[in-house]
Image (tube, rainbow, N blue to C red):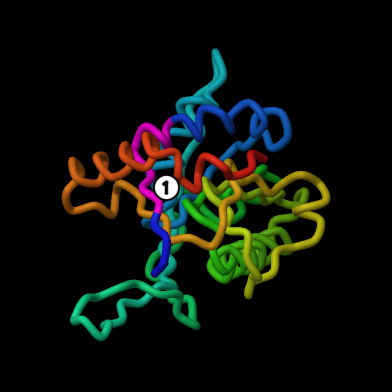
């Protein structure tokens, strides 16, 4: 049976608060790109902690990528498992961004909730780098610097690959590294009270994988 851990909104808030000082020190993001749907809430919370006095809020763009697919089980339940192909459901809003050239030379933080197989993150980085490089060839300017923040990195064999320099230069950030468990996030819950109860019971029992996870 797959082990599940229940992450509450309070957990997410505190993980973002904890990560923000290091992101300000190392990444200094000028724009965030949230991968939907799991990256939306962390990105919005992060923005509050990344705001500097006298500076405007960091803009948030959204992209929609789908990798998980619903699969029926033998007991007529439906579970989500990683698929094999990333589907682009939404891309950058150029009506707000102006044009792709406005990303050239910027420090951009890509936000998602979990680094599972890494397939989605690989796709996002490659496609964004490709689009921005085309704009840089057209408009000129410095190279755009992409970084990543996730709430949880699963300690497992990855299918996707990220640029080596992203790791070596400290541009990959995970608030926690956990085992290969099923993480239940609050925005997926249909009964938030039950979700919070299960999360509270796990904490009280002291068997929450998250408690033994390594910090960044």
Q: Is residue 210 magenta?
A: no
Residue 151 or residue 56, whichever sits in front? 151
The residue positioned 63% from the left and 59% from the top of the image is 155
Residue 112 or residue 182, whichever sits in front? 182
Q: Is residue 21 above or below residue 113?
A: above
The residue positioned 34% from the left and 40% from the top of the image is 8
Which residue bears the numbered disc 1?
96
The residue positioned 64% from the left and 60% from the top of the image is 132
> In the image, 44: left or right of 164?
left
Mark 1 surroundings: few (<14), some (14-19) or many (≥20) residues within 10 A = few
What is the x, y in percent for residue 23?
64, 34
Secondary element at image label 1: helix
> In the image, 174: left or right of 201?
right
The residue positioned 20% from the left and 44% from the top of the image is 192
Q: Is residue 9 magenta?
A: yes
Q: Quadrant of the N terminus?
A: bottom left
Question: Which region shows up in magenta?
Answer: 5-13
Q: Quadrant of the C terminus?
A: top right
What is the x, y in percent for residue 187?
29, 49
> In the image, 159: left or right of 9?
right
Q: Is residue 26 above or below residue 53?
A: below
What is the x, y in percent for residue 141?
76, 50
Residue 197 or residue 37, whichever sits in front? 197
Q: Is residue 151 above or below residue 52?
A: below
């Amino acid at each position: 049976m797959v082990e599940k851990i229940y992450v509450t909104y309070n957990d997410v808030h505190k993980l973002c608060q904890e990560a923000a000082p290091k992101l300000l020190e190392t990444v200094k993001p000028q724009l965030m790109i949230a991968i939907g749907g799991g990256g939306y809430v962390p990105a919005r919370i992060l923005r509050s902690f990344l705001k500097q006095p006298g500076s405007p809020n960091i803009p948030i763009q959204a992209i929609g990528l789908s990798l998980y697919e619903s699969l029926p089980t033998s007991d007529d339940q439906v579970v989500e498992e990683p698929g094999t192909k990333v589907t682009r459901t939404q891309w950058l809003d150029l009506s707000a961004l102006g044009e792709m050239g406005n990303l050239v030379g910027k420090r951009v933080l890509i936000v998602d909730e979990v680094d599972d197989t890494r397939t989605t993150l690989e796709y996002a980085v490659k496609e964004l780098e490709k689009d921005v490089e085309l704009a840089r060839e057209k408009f000129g300017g410095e190279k755009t610097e992409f970084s990543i923040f996730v709430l949880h990195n699963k300690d497992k064999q990855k299918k996707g690959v990220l640029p080596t320099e992203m790791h070596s230069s400290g541009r990959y950030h995970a608030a926690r590294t956990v085992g290969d468990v099923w993480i239940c996030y609050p925005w997926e819950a249909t009964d938030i009270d039950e979700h919070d109860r299960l999360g509270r019971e796990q904490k009280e029992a002291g068997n929450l994988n998250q408690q033994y996870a390594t910090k960044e």
